[in-house]
Image: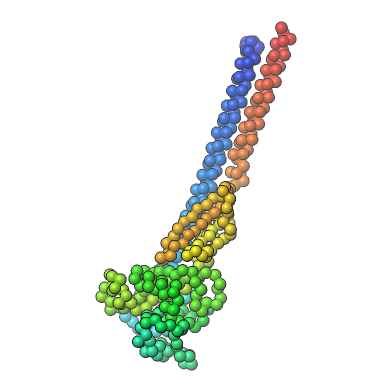
Amino acid sequence: MDRLLLKWKKMPSMFLRLAGLLLVIIVLACTFYTWSNLSNSSSQTKLNRFNLAADQSAAGIAAQFEVYANTLYSGRALFVSGEPVTRTSWDGFVKAQNISQRYPAITSIDYVTVVSRTNLQNFLQQLTSEQQPGTPTITVFPTTQHEQLAILTYYSAQTNRQNIIGYDLMSDPARSRVLGIARDDNVPRASVPLKLTGDTTVTGPSIVIVLPVYKATAASLSTVADRRDDLQGYVAMGLHLKPIIASVVAQSAFAGQINVQVVTNGETIYSTGTTSSSSSSLKKTIRLDLAGQTWNLAFTAPKNYSLSLSAISAPYITLVSGILVAILLGITFYYAIGLRIVRSDKTN
């Protein structure tokens, strides 16, 4: 011990200052390295969680949409089975599927018959004969001059929509367009956002999804020409969009912290809040093709998304603690060297 003290006294003051400065630099370097690692780890954690939540929400919306669209195939099977379909059998078919409980976003599942104007009167007489006694004569509305009409023939009775039998979907450009696309593609196709005919209870955005029904006697549907020649009608579904999106978003991780805005055809159809414009917030946009319509999903979250208080504060506590330790070491060396110089002077 005495030898160490002796060596201490003999060490030049400048060397001690350099040693002290080097130790302070090492402490600061370790501090900043640890702070950087902790900060990067937190940033990567929140980014991974945010991306996972966004991806899962987008995948969930796509999956839900597909489930809803695929329900139309059972309706088409009913018409191509060869058995005659009436309003009564259609109502029984829809009710047996328990649509309102299993698929709450569906307003109704309807059948639309494609009729040429030359056969219109015979069709309306047959349709009127299927109605209950006392029901007014079925008429087509609105009045158009189209050669081919797409007349709503049957609709599910458990909805709150008014009786809209006789509505010509070809009278509306948005509906007419999706009917033509679905006919040629032979898969479910969705319209742009619109207001459902006869729906007086919901003001939110809705769409129509349609699936073509071809004649049971069709020999081939391999070409567009075949599909147009053998078209019989459509199974159509009215769909409210907000319940589908909201149910998926509510199930995502940290749902209360993430904002979602869904835009299609230039119209915002769903939003949980104003998307943040802050450069420090997390952002991600996902594009989905849902039954022929493009949906853009914009996800945003605060900069500390999903992080606990300890995870947020750990880098800063480490930084402050390291700087304080470095300061204390510097002060200690400063006074120790000063004390050594004073003692050395007294000895001399």
Residue 74, x across and y down, in percent: 38, 73
One can see residue 92 in this view: no
Residue situated furthest left in the rendering: 219
- In the foreground, 266 or 7: 266
Determine the residue positioned at 57% across, 53% down. 277
Occupied quadrant, residue 213:
bottom left
Point out the image quarter for the N terminus. top right
Furthest residue to the top? 348
Instruction: Say if 255 sits above or below 331 in the image.
Output: below
* Residue 204 visible in the snapshot: yes
The vertical placement of 324 against 207, above or below, is: above
Q: In this picture, is 232 found above or below 293?
A: below
> Which residue appears farthest toward the front when viewing the image?
145
Would residue 15 appear left or right of 110 to someone viewing this image? right
Quadrant of the image occupied by residue 9? top right
Residue 341 position, x and y percent, is 70, 14
Residue at 64% x, 10% y is: 10
Q: Quick one: quadrant of the C terminus?
A: top right
**Could you say which quadrant of the image residue 322 lies in?**
top right
Query: Of 38 and 291, which appears nearest the observer?
Result: 291
Which residue is found at the position 53% from the left and 78% from the top? 160
